[in-house]
Image (cartoon, rainbow, N blue to C red):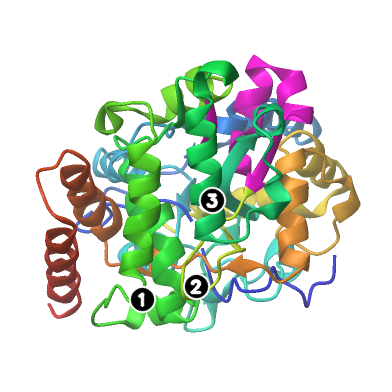
Amino acid sequence: MNKKKLFSGIGAGVLSLSLLLTGCGNADKSGSKEDSKGNVTIDVFQFKVEFKKQFEKVAKEYEKEHKGVNINITTVGGGEDYGAALKSKFASGKEPAIYNIGGPQDVKDWQKKLADLSDTEASKAALKGTLDGVTNDGKVLGLPYNQEGYGFIYNKAVFEKAGIDPKSIKSFADLEKAVKTLDSKKKDLGLEAVFALPGKETWVTGLHLSNTFLAPEFDNNVLNTFNAKKVDFKYGDAFKKVLDLQNDYSVQPTVSLDYSKQVEELFSLQKVAMIQQGNWVYSSIAGIDQDFADKGIGILPIPVEGYKEDAIPVGIPMYWGVNSNKDEKTVAEAKKFLDWLYTSDKGKETVINDFKFIPAYDGFDASKISDPLSKEIYQYSQDGKTIGWTFMGYPTNWGQNELGVQIQKYLSKDAKWEDVVKTTQAAWEKSRNK
């Protein structure tokens, strides 16, 4: 993979969660983790539940190779609020040595608790553009997890049985036509519904779905988003159409449908034809039906009418941060572990084969990307059919606690779409003009 080539359209784009990170105060540094024998314990607090077991396994292997280093991993994610959990963790005084941050908003919120990672081998190997959103005053304050993409994951067999060629879906009109066809045949196809929209998960709607339609407004650049004093919802009508399509043809009630039910119960058991998710769900699906995960799923774009209707959002889901409050030896060992993970032969093999990651670093063999969703996403990037990840440039809490909550009201018919737009625009401006 050429270091000069980050997935096109990402800019400084980054994922996943709009953290509740303000007002943490100055928690106790919690002392050195070095014991009387000189052993060091690295506490890791991370959000990605999909590779929890694999991560714990590789940590044990690292310990065997690096005597005197102990790694404790705590995973909080899935349906839980990682940002709130991280804030509580720091407030308790039990600060982790390694934790997760998003883009520039999180860097601003956590700046006093982030070590400079500019001297790591991993930062030097990171693909061009991936560090833009976590670099401040020349200091690299985060290391990329991986690259991810999302869209509509679909059941190939169901589409084939319904007579739908997924390659023909290149616009909203095409998607809508396919959805109506699936709905008309859902009994014969053994479906409860076409979609499973997890309206309970404000990150799915308020972060991921919204990003698809707001990123173009900010030229697919997370720093532009971070510096924006207002949001116009330039593609708000297109946003509403896709949201309505999912909701109208989804298992109901969507506001009480969560990630676990969406992915594990409904899609993995083939009770719905499509879900809005990304390549990170591969492991969950494989854990239920390996054959279905390997041969039966694909990914479709989320069409943005008036912009790109055949592209998918691709970017960095989250970054690793190292706690600057820790003693020098703990900080040094934390950096060594992250370097080993992304630059050693053993670490790189694990990242590709066990974690099923699309690497965000130079030195990896992209041909070894194994799962079908990641392969398709990689191809979208090679073809230049991508939209940036910019939601980590949203004001703190805005994506989930403002927009996501307002979307829940809309799905429950307690608010009109115009109210959603107006209320969240005001919240954005208020946050940016403090």
Q: Secondary structure at mark 1?
A: helix
In the image, which is nearer the foreground, mark 1 or mark 3? Answer: 3
Query: Quick check: marks 2 and 3 in contact, CB under 8 Å?
Result: no
Q: Amino acid at mark 3?
A: Leu
Q: Position of residue 299 (x, y in %)?
A: 65, 45
Q: Amino acid at mark 1?
A: Phe
Whichever of labels 1 and 3 marks the residue nearer the N terminus, that label is 3
| Residue nearest the viewer, comparing 63 with 179 | 179
Check disc 3: other Cα within 10 Å, few if <14, some if 14-19, many if 20+: many
Check disc 2: other Cα within 10 Å, few if <14, some if 14-19, many if 20+: many
**In which quadrant of the rendered view does residue 294 lie?**
top right
Query: Quick check: marks 2 and 1 in contact, CB under 8 Å?
Result: yes
Is residue 245 in sight in this rendering? yes
- Residue range (magenta): 272-299
Instruction: Left or right? Give the position of 208 relative to 414.
Output: right
Instruction: Left or right? Give the position of 89 relative to 149.
Output: left
In the image, which is nearer the foreground, mark 2 or mark 1? Answer: 1
For label 2, the residue is 133
Q: Position of residue 365 (x, y in %)?
A: 89, 54
The residues tagged by marks 2 and 3 sit, at their Cα atoms, a distance apart of 33 Å
**Residue 273 belongs to magenta span:** yes
In the image, which is nearer the foreground, mark 2 or mark 3? Answer: 3
The residues tagged by marks 1 and 3 sit, at their Cα atoms, a distance apart of 32 Å
Q: Secondary structure at mark 3?
A: helix
Residue plotted at (86% across, 61% down): 363
Whichever of labels 2 and 1 marks the residue nearer the N terminus, that label is 2
Instruction: Left or right? Give the position of 64 relative to 399.
Output: right
